Amino acid sequence: MGYVVAAVLGYVLGSIPVALLVARRHGVDLFATGDGNPGAWNALEQLGARRALPAFLGDAAKGLVAAVLGMAFAGWWGGFAGVAGAMLGHAFPLYTGFRGGKAVMTFVGGAFALAPLAALVCLAVCIVVTAATAFTWGARAAVVAFPFAQLALDPVEHVIATGALMTLIGLLFLLRSRPRVDAGVP
């Protein structure tokens, strides 16, 4: 029962359209610009780093809070259910007609509760690669490094479970790949 409660709470938290709200505050409709994705990355592209930071932190907070609440209800697996619910809420949000994002930052926030050491290692990877190149490469390097860091630090069952969450992100990228709205592509 604790898993169900965690998943439902996660879904409700995940449904909060943080990036849309942040962008709207700056007069930008994320559905109508960039790749049309109502998530933190499109907010970054449309608003710049400083103005998009609350979108990144808010989307991550949804996963982190869902994981912590889930862990309070049912241990690590409750945290997993909470993050899964939050990611589904972000991808298919109740409040925006089920038009959501790809849940990457929601996963990242949840990872800091589910696999804190691996998440910290990947944060360090992101910082180092970003300093050497650009944030786009730092973020990608951290995502690629996460399963390896987690495999070195956590039980294999946890790696398999978070791998399933990362697979959801991959599926969302496949399903939601669309031309950029502002690229003049019909």
Image (cartoon, rainbow, N blue to C red):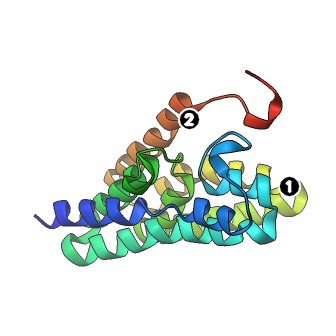
Residue 23 percent location from the top left of the image:
68, 62
Taking the spot 43% from the left edge, 40% from the top edge, the residue there is 168
Q: Is residue 81 left or right of residue 185?
A: left
- Which residue sits at x=38%, y=43%? 164
Outermost residue to the right: 132
181, 42: nearer the viewer: 181
Residue 128 higher or lower than 137, as above or below: below
Q: Please state which of residues 147 and 49 is positioned toward the viewer in this rendering.
A: 49
Q: Is residue 155 visible?
A: no
Residue pointed to by mark 1:
134
Asked if residue 58 is positioned above or below residue 77 in the image, the reply reads below
Helix, strand or loop at mark 1: loop
Q: Earlier in the sequence, mark 2 or mark 1?
A: 1
Image quarter where the C terminus lies is: top right
In the picture, which quadrant includes the N terminus? bottom left
- Residue drawn at (76%, 66%), measured in percent from left and top? 127
Q: Which mark is residue 173?
A: 2
Q: Amino acid at mark 1?
A: Ala
